[in-house]
Image: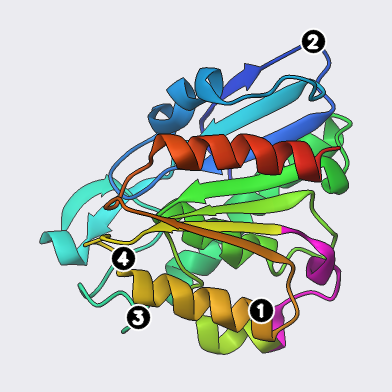
Amino acid sequence: MSQLLENIEIETAPNPTVAIIWMHGLGADGNDFVPLVSELDLKGLPGIRFVFPHANTMPVTVNGGYVMRSWYDIVNADIGRREDEAGLRASQLQVEALIAREKSRGIPASRIILAGFSQGCAMTLQTGLRHPEKLAGLMCLSGYVPLADKIAAERSEASLGTPIFMVHGQHDGVIPIARATASRDLLKSLGYQLEWHDYTMQHSLCQEEIDHIGVWLKKVLA
């Protein structure tokens, strides 16, 4: 197994019984969403361990080969073309290793949520749809289903029971909302339980979205 990714952990109570593994976007790191923990309405929820991993660094083709933290290479500005399948699958194994560590610390798969923004959202879906056990949920922020043509054959049967929360900005100039709605429609056609919201924002987060995340967490962790 490859070395576990460096990560930041925040526990909302001693001996947490829930884990949320939250993946950042291109060029960011695990610190990116740490401040959000204090903004979420977690009242009434059990203790949660938030895990914010740092992706490894690599040259990113679309950015002129500049080395930055990235879950996979982006070869073309049109993210649906020439996907970095090897990179996606390598990072999938690293996310699976983080899931395995939470299980080894006593949190079952059914109490583990995968979450991510942009590239991190793609990794949430890449990993969560293939994970052999039902997870507590997939929180998918401003992203898309990667390797979409392979998901019907590769998804796990157990993943059909995993709730999906998917949101996007109507004016996203990085990942057009059409890419996200195509992913949403694909998942619905495959039978997934999916909650969808879109907001009048760009490639970012907004307060309404943060409020919806809190409501969804209470629903899936009830």
Q: Which mark is residue 14?
A: 2
Residue under circle 1? 188
Q: Nearer the viewer, residue 170 or 93?
A: 170
Image quadrant occupied by the C terminus: top right
**Residue at screen point 81% across, 39% down:** 221
Query: 92 above or below 101?
Result: below
Q: Residue furthest top?
A: 14
Question: Are the residues tagged 1 and 4 within 8 Å (C-beta)?
Answer: no
Residue 115 at x, y percent in the picture: 58, 47
Q: Callout 1, which amino acid?
A: Lys
Q: Callout 4, which amino acid?
A: Ile
**Residue at screen point 20% across, 72% down:** 77
Residue 204 at x, y percent in the picture: 32, 45
Question: Are the residues tagged 2 and 3 within 8 Å (C-beta)?
Answer: no
Q: Callout 3, which amino acid?
A: Gly
Task: Specify which label sits upstream in the sequence, 1 or 3.
Answer: 3
- CA separation in Å, label 1 and label 3: 19 Å
- CA separation in Å, label 1 and label 4: 20 Å
Q: Residue furthest left?
A: 64
Q: Which residues are magenta?
A: 153-163
Residue under circle 4? 175
Q: Which mark is residue 80?
A: 3
Q: Nearer the viewer, residue 65 or 185?
A: 185
Q: Nearer the viewer, residue 176 or 197?
A: 197
Assign a secondary structure to mark 3. loop
Mark 1, mark 4: which one is toward the viewer?
1
Mark 4, mark 2: which one is toward the viewer?
4
